[in-house]
Amino acid sequence: MGEEVKPRDLVRKLYDCPNVEHLSDEEAKSRSSVFGQRTEFGSLNFVSSVRNRSAGVTVYLGGKEVRQASVSPRQRQIIEKAPETIAKVARYLDRVPIVSIRRTMGNNPDFNPHCTLFISRYAGYPVQIAYMWGETLMAYRPKAPGPELSLIYVPEWPEHERQILVFPEENVTFALGSDYMGESKKGFLRMAMWHAKLEGMLGVHAGSKVVVARDPEGKPRRYAKLLFGLSATGKTTHSCHDHGLDQPGERVEIVQDDVCFLRSDGSALGTERGFYLKTEGLHPVTQPLLYRAATQPRTVFENVMVDYQGHIDFDDETLTSNGRGVVQMSDLAPRASSSINLPPVSELDGLILIFITRRNTILPICSKLNPEQAALAFMLGESVESSAGDPTKAGESVRVVGTNPFIVGDEAKEGVWFYDFIKRHEQKVQAYLINTGGVGEVRERLPSGSWRTTRPVARVQILETASVFRSILRNTIKWRDCRYFGVQVPAQLDGFDISKYDPEKYYSHTELQRLSQELKRERHEYIEQFGSLDRAIVAATGI
């Protein structure tokens, strides 16, 4: 290959190269098994060298429509050297053994991206990535309509040159120097969301479910739910929870836990059959559905602590706090939906939008939002950083539009689409901001720039958050105005004394005024960078 190599041309060559071996599902599993440890449940656990996404060295390349708004000096260096790097990769892939596996994303009549994963197996073991990733998507269906997407792993690439090169317009991503399976999962979803946007849809980083709950008059109401959230905020936990809905006729149908494509009629196309859950603290009492699914033989673990006898310890973070597992949607039965897609709003009693954040100071644990506040919550995407994204910044405040770190292109356009969608369906859409962190924390900035906690947080428990969801769905919450944020908050809800998380119990009125004003100013400064947003969304900051 010459020095000028187009990523798409490189992929075309790989399909027919003699050094590429196209694996069947059984071959991928059997070859991977020798590199994994068998657990007490009959499942496999693999350990990777890289244990989180390499967000700081991920770059988008192509026309101005796909470029990142801002890049670090390291990312700039990667971009400048990209042509040289791709040529170097092409020469390398000419010489080493490669395996590939194919999958189709989604199961619908209209939009099903076809995904091909190529992995250099020069180092031997990385075939496990193919097996794990293959467990997340559907069998390859070549006649289903959708774009062709490819991702190329070279795990043995030099550590100091680790980089993730994304070419959205060419349908190709390169993962160099990483053997973390999350790069393939998110790499394909990122490219698919870009193409969904070209088709007039909005790719959302959100779990989805269909719920039937009885209202105060005992009438069953059928809702769809979209749960937005960054990694480690509880998106998968609550997407795969029954919320304690136990009255006759009530039910929960788990649809998706990560990414779907929202259409203008309120329907949403699902993407996966395997859920990539964070295993930290997984417990049979607080997360019964997920725990039962995770302890089935078909589950595949990554970087979870398993002892020499096969016993799993979900609380042991010796390897990482970002332990993962791929559980099959079918193992969430009887709560698993028969479809991975959501129906349109016209077929439901309503669509409930949940923005999950994890804050620890003054934010109420439940806030009811009007359309402008909902659009603001979407654009703010507030939470704290987790070990899944950047472990060096875990615990720090972070804002990510749509709680979606995988947006390609103008983020403001996503907010415009979302606000128009809410206004179009205003009579049937409800929106809430749910804080799965807690309240009461007091932090002090040290001269070094780091933070010290001088008073710990009163942490919200999973079953308490489930009580909030249950009360929303049953429409039994009594609301009151929050004088600090201009939203409505619960004055009372069934089965849970929410008053113990009232910020006024932990801070003086003066402190609450100061801290809330600081937060609102931060939000206003952040949202002002998106000039194409409706000014009503900016005004929703309260400044």
Image: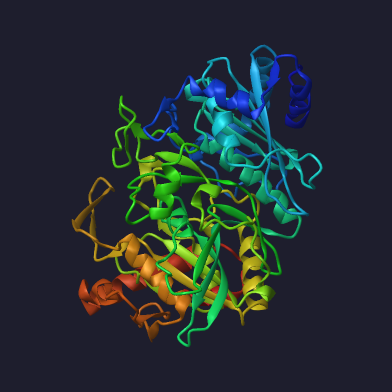
Depth order, front residue of 83/213: 213
The spot of residue 9 in percent (x, y) is: 78, 27
Depth order, front residue of 363/330: 330
Residue displayed at 32% across by 47% down:
281
The spot of residue 432 in percent (x, y) is: 47, 72
Q: Report if residue 532 is visible in the image.
A: no
Left/right of residue 56 with respect to residue 446 in the rendered view:
right
Image vertical order of residue 160 relative to residue 106, above or below: above
Residue displayed at 56% across by 60% down:
208
The spot of residue 451 in percent (x, y) is: 26, 51
The image quadrant where one finds the N terminus is top right
Image vertical order of residue 367 relative to residue 446, above or below: below
Query: In the figure, residue 419 lies in which quadrant?
Result: bottom right
The residue most toward the left is 454
The image quadrant where one finds the C terminus is bottom left
The residue most toward the right is 143
Q: How many marks?
A: 0
The residue most toward the top is 95
Left/right of residue 323 with respect to residue 268 in the rendered view:
left
Q: Report if residue 477 is visible in the image.
A: yes
Left/right of residue 351 with respect to residue 63 in the rendered view:
left
Depth order, front residue of 80/311: 311
The spot of residue 255 in percent (x, y) is: 57, 57
Q: How is the image coloured?
A: rainbow
The residue most toward the front is 248
Residue displayed at 45% across by 33% down:
43
